[in-house]
Image (cartoon, helix red, strand yellow):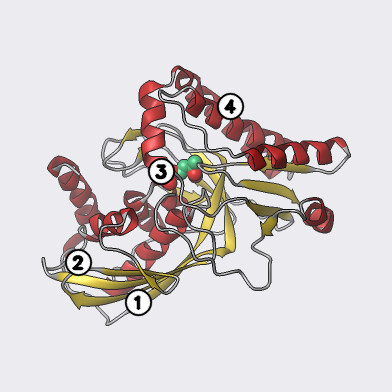
Amino acid sequence: MSSSAETRRAEVIARLVGPMAGRSPARASAEAYAPANIALCKYWGKRDAALNLPCTSSLSMSLGRLGSRVVLRPRTGLDQVTLNGAPLAADSAFVRRVRVFLDLFRPAPDWGVALDAHNTIPTAAGFASSASGFAALTRALDSLFGWNLPPRDLSIIARLGSGSACRSLDDGFVEWQAGTRADGMDSYAEPFDTPWPDLCMALVVLSADAKAIGSREAMQRTVDSSALYDGWPRQVAADLAELKTAIRARDLATVGAVSERNALAMHATMLGARPPILYWRPETVSVMHRIWELRAAGLSVYFTMDAGPNVKVLYDAREAARVRSALAEWTVLTPEDSEAQETKGNSDGH
Ligand code: PMV
């Protein structure tokens, strides 16, 4: 990261944390949890890479018990990171990202942390593990240093770790306002307050392998080289407006249709990149067709996808058993599963 980017990020922290910036921790350890989130109207493309400021607003749904738990203990020297109990190499992409983020908060140059992260969601396969991870880390830092910041400020800090992490600090639906300010102080996420407990999301796990290209790089390449990106902000504006109206009306058919077309349009912008980006595997397409067949047979079921091969399925709680049995040939995870599975995985990605 360039020094001007570091300075701009440090300025954001100084503004939010105020006189407490650079102080030693208030306690010996801290622990926090944050849910993963899946966007129904996607964030794809940054207007500012240093501060992770998006070109458009976005709207997501949080995944309850599927997410990340982080335990932080200060130590002298290098940061040590474990994921689901296994130590991660200091030069792994995830540890490097975490270190750059922690650099914003160190009270002294030799101040490090032992960070134990536990994901209940497959890491690095488009399942938002970095979003829940950076949101949980932000909460743990707030508790460790005793800042007691309001949710809006925590959302801004989490965004500096990973853009979509700013949407992982609340349950239910969450809207991330793109904002217009250069310092990003108006770019944060807030609950979109319509409870809809019967709206369910299932994750179809097709691959838990780390993806070949991370969302950060893929997004940048799309913005820089895809002729199809020009139409994206217009599509998001229309989709977001329609989605919010449909959520308020608890209109699953519209929420599902908008989510599906928004995800497909995002992937279309990637296909137009040079070189092109295609996250889908043959099974990804099989699941999409299965969903369309189920719809043709009268089931109200829809899909969305992120920067990975897996598919997320939207449906009403009353259809849960039928959806499960129709997807029985694949591994399906839901936040409602009584024991959220601990999944060992790789360490990079979204
Ligand atoms: O926050 P990032 O850099 O991992 O990007 C997330 C991008 C998508 O998951 C594809 C879309 C979204 O809005 O979450």
The CA distance from mark 4 to mark 1 is 42 Å
Q: In what element is the residue under mark 3?
A: loop
Q: Residue at x 53, y 59 (%)?
A: 122
Q: Using the image, tell me which numbered label, if any, was put on residue 20.
A: 2
Residue linked to disc 1: 30
Residue with the most extreme front position: 282
Mark sitting earlier along the chain (4/1): 1
Q: Using the image, tell me which numbered label, if any, was put on residue 129.
A: none
Q: Using the image, tell me which numbered label, if any, was put on residue 238.
A: 4
Residue type pointed to by label 1: Ala
Q: Residue at x 45, y 35 (%)?
A: 44
* Mark 3 C-beta closer than 8 Å to ligand 1: yes
Q: Are marks 2 and 4 in contact (CB under 8 Å)?
A: no
Label 3, residues with CA under 10 Å away: few <14, some 14-19, many ≥20: some
Q: Residue at x 52, y 57 (%)?
A: 36
Residue 159 picture location, percent across and down? 36, 49
**Of residues 176 and 1, which is closer to you in this image?**
1
Give the mark toward the camera: 2 or 1: 1
Q: In what element is the residue under mark 1?
A: strand
The CA distance from mark 1 to mark 3 is 29 Å
